Amino acid sequence: MPSFVANVNQQTDVLPKGVKALMDNGLVTIPGRYIKPPSHRAVKHLIVPGVEIPVIDMAALESDREKFVQTLCKASSEWGIFQVINHGIPVATMQGMVHGVLELFDLPIEEKMKYYTEEVFVPVRYCTSMTPSQETHMEWHDHFQHYFSNREKEHPWPEKPACYKRLASSYVSSVRHLSQTLMSALSEGLGLDSNCLAKSFGDSEMILRSNYYLPCPNPDLALGMNGHTDSGGLTILFEDQVGGLQARKGDLWYDLKPIKNAFIVNIADQLEILSNGKYKSIEHRVLVQPDQTRLSIVAFCNPSRDAVIGPLLELIDEQNPLLYKSTLYQEHITNAETPHYHIEDLQASVKLCNHGSVMHGRGPSSRGPGSAKVKHVQECIGGQVHGRGNPAANQQSWIVH
Ligand code: OGA
Ligand code: NI
């Protein structure tokens, strides 16, 4: 095969312009940078195929709100991930967005490279994997990302493809509305006022990311996206029917079966923290396929970067002690460096106690209570028991038990 392949494999110091750019140049084997070491690859016998995660029917919101809230609360506590049907967003809006995004990825590489950056908080970003310059083993996907800060009324949408601005802005406003509805119901699920979580988020910010997973010539050696939890509030994901998204419970990875035109919604770290661990920020990852392209469009509904996020004090009492410290959201993501990262980072940065198992029993022994990260947390807090205090007023006030 063409000398190009040999070149790509040898020049590991040259950052790729994306998986699509590699494939368009006739790549037949996966470049070394995208190969995961054996310990990071998916292990077949730990995968549970075709799982149906809870399905939330939003039509029930009108007919029996209380029952709807209960179902949502149960799904968020037991799984932290669920599918939403009858959500009211027209199929045309969703399909329109897919169309626009596919055209965006289809632009010539020179056009896409105008947006190439590893910065997260820029209005428009095109990138491959997460932060290629810092990664030894990259993720097999390209993405476009939009960051909408609350102060940014006029988003600088790419002018090409011509249809994109109209289709994407309509999609964003629909998804924003859906997130607000779900956040109200999630607040009620905690026994609190419906605006309680939204208030804690302050002027919320949204990141919209379209992930493009090309067929991979060596799918067993790569991952579309590493296992991680989302660092923000609530994630609303729309995907095609190809599949590959997996959620982790204990040592097992559950292969999620997408329902056509439904959204997959997952709880992210800040909602786990605000709910003092009642809602679970579930770890997830993406496998790649040998013969199919997969597209996911992900809306991260996040707090303001100025918001201090800690457990809601109304939820704390003798039976429900404080499990997390309060952190400025900006600080949380700075520690994590990217808007999504590995479960150990959340644990090391905010979680205060492990109840004998790490993060809801998800972790393998390397992440268990004796692991280096947990020891680091214990050393940092010195094993002391502090008074309860007001976590919002005193960010160093921790309870250890
Ligand atoms: C993410 C993510 C999953 C997917 O972008 O954080 O988890 O299916 N994506 O693309
Ligand atoms: Ni994610």
Image (cartoon, grey):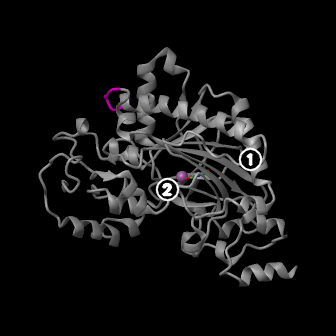
Task: Give me the residue at 38% from left, 51% from top.
Answer: 329
On screen, residue 36 versus residue 160, left or right, reads left
Residue 28: percent from left, percent from top:
81, 72
Q: Which residue is mark 2?
A: 339
For residue 175, the mark is: none
Examine the structure image and report whether residue 191 is included in the region drawn in magenta.
yes
Mark 2 residue CB less than 8 A from any atom of ligand 1: yes
Q: Which residue is mark 1?
A: 159
Could you say which quadrant of the image residue 364 lies in? bottom left
Task: Give me the residue at 26% from left, 50% from top.
Answer: 323
Task: Give me the residue at 18% from left, 39% from top.
Answer: 317
Could you say which quadrant of the image residue 174 lies in? top right
Residue 183: percent from left, percent from top:
44, 33
On screen, residue 32 versus residue 339, left or right, reads right
Residue lying farthest to the right in this orientation: 1
Q: Which residues are magenta?
A: 189-193
SS for dot 2: loop
Residue 273: percent from left, percent from top:
34, 47
| Of the image marks 1 and 2, the number of the one nearer the N terminus | 1
